[in-house]
């Protein structure tokens, strides 16, 4: 092991462990923030957080579907490692036995909450949560009841956070009483239903209604982030708290409603679904810096948080401590995959696979999984594949991925394809 990671770990071991607040936006385009430069969306509280953070604007999640993405955040593993690649099981998506089988598969992986619990952290789950009773995954307290026989699909009672109340968060912080805590704050915002308060919706009246509602939902979510961070300030906990921010996947909001599979966001291998800003704020411990070049991934969050808490990341975690700039520079590529929404075969990732992708420098190669191109992208609906042959994009110069460069760059394609094949090992 190199000297710098050892020094970082040694320093963490001899310091009081930080509180951990993980803020997860939901169905939020990477470009739809004030600090990114969006001309209309107002995100003053997240903008402030970004200015105080180690910020990676080229952050990614390894898959563009919420359940699988959240499972990767919680385990520090790729979907084909923890094997939660889809939102719903094969068969009836609300069938309790099938859903319980997915929860059992998830429980085979160690979780961030459980690993922090071993370090004497109290923890609270709020908002989005798919994986059953979250106390079984290491949380000491939960908003979500997780009873698959009672529904509990997106997060049941946990989904009141943000939209209806912030009180469970405040009460949890109050009861911690000096003990290190881990807060999972994943409100289903700006996710549909796009039903923002009228006072916010009126600010976007010049936009088509569907767009206005989405923008107002982002501002509503931003307000809740501000409320959470203000409470840390009120309790004089901010300097002792590491705050991590990202979105679980992207979003494209057309002026008129369209089916999910008609956009390039959820379930897609495009940046519209995969890219997200990633932030790490820890006053006095992590220097604020905006990084517009370095690639970061949500699989890096668990190793970062565990190392900050004085714990060694698990050996099977492929991510990197985001505070370790030398290791980040040494990592040349990041990877991911896109899968169907409803499983063909829950425990077998390649049966659900649609696309794999790799990014190195400015280039992104997307490779369709040919045997599965005829699989439905959405339940019982005809699928229109985004494309059937590999495509190469320069995502720095062409962030909308509109120009396929594959014919002009055979050497780059060959190298990236070899990297992608070495990475994929279900």
Image (cartoon, rainbow, N blue to C red):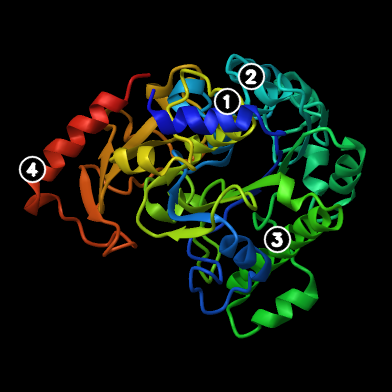
Please name the residue that numbered disc 3 is placed on. Answer: 221
Mark 4 or 1, which is nearer the eye?
4
Determine which of the numbered discs, if any, sits on residue 404 in the image.
Answer: none
Query: Does dot 3 land on a helix, a strand or a loop?
Result: helix
Question: Which of the pair 375/162 is nearer the observer?
Answer: 162
Query: Does dot 1 land on a helix, a strand or a loop?
Result: loop
Please name the residue that numbered disc 4 is placed on. Answer: 411
Q: Earlier in the sequence, mark 4 or mark 3?
A: 3
Where 262 falls versus 422 (above or below)? Answer: below
Distance from the alpha carbon under mark 4 to that under mark 2: 45 Å
Distance from the alpha carbon under mark 1 to that under mark 3: 30 Å
Q: Earlier in the sequence, mark 2 or mark 1?
A: 1
Distance from the alpha carbon under mark 2 to that under mark 1: 6 Å
Q: Residue at x 58, y 71 (%)?
A: 211
Count of marks placed on residues: 4
Asked if residue 111 lies left or right of residue 39, the reply is: right
Question: Which of the pair 388/202 is nearer the observer?
Answer: 202
Determine which of the numbered discs, if any, sits on residue 89 in the image.
Answer: 1
Q: Residues within 10 Å of mark 3 (few under 14, many from 20)?
A: many
Circle 4/circle 2 CB separation < 8 Å? no
Residue 194 x/y as whole percent = 68, 62
Residue 9 x/y as whole percent = 54, 29
Please name the residue that numbered disc 2 is placed on. Answer: 98
Q: Earlier in the sequence, mark 3 or mark 2?
A: 2
Question: Which of the pair 272/49 is nearer the observer?
Answer: 49
């Amino acid at each position: 092991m190199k000297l710098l990671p050892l020094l970082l770990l040694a320093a963490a071991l001899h310091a009081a462990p930080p509180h951990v607040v993980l803020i997860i936006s939901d169905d939020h385009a990477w470009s739809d923030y004030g600090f990114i430069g969006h001309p209309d969306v107002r995100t003053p509280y997240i903008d402030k957080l970004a200015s105080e953070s180690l910020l990676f604007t080229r952050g990614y999640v390894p898959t563009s579907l919420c359940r699988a993405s959240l499972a990767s955040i919680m385990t520090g593993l790729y979907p084909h490692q923890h094997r939660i690649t889809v939102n719903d099981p094969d068969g009836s998506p609300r069938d309790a036995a099938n859903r319980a089988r997915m929860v059992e598969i998830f429980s085979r992986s160690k979780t961030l909450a459980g690993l922090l619990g071993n370090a004497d952290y109290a923890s609270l789950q709020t908002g989005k949560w798919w994986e059953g009773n979250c106390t079984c995954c290491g949380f000491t307290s939960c908003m979500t009841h997780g009873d698959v026989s009672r529904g509990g699909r997106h997060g049941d009672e946990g989904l009141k956070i943000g939209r209806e109340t912030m009180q469970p968060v405040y009460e949890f912080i109050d009861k911690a009483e000096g003990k290190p805590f881990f807060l999972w704050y994943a409100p289903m915002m700006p996710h549909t239903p796009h039903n923002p308060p009228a006072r916010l919706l009126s600010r976007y009246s010049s936009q088509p209604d569907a767009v206005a509602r989405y923008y107002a939902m982002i501002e509503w979510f931003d307000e809740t982030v501000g409320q959470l961070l203000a409470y840390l300030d009120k309790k004089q906990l901010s300097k002792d708290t590491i705050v991590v921010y990202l979105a679980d996947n992207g979003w494209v909001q057309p002026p008129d409603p369209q089916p999910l599979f008609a956009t390039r966001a959820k379930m897609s291998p495009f940046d519209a679904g995969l890219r997200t800003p990633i932030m790490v704020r820890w006053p006095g411990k992590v220097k604020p810096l905006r990084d517009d070049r370095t690639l970061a991934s949500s699989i890096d969050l668990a190793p970062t948080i565990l190392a900050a808490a004085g714990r060694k990341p698990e050996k099977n975690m492929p991510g990197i401590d985001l505070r370790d700039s030398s290791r980040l520079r040494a990592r040349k590529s990041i990877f991911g995959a896109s899968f169907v929404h409803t499983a063909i075969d829950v425990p077998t990732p390649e049966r659900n696979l649609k696309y794999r992708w790799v990014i190195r420098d400015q280039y992104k190669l997307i490779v369709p999984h040919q045997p599965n191109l005829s699989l439905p992208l959405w339940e019982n609906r005809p699928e229109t594949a985004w494309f059937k042959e590999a495509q190469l994009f320069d995502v720095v110069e062409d962030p909308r991925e509109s120009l396929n460069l594959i014919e002009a760059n055979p050497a780059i394609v060959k190298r990236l394809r070899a990297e992608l094949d070495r990475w994929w090992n279900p």
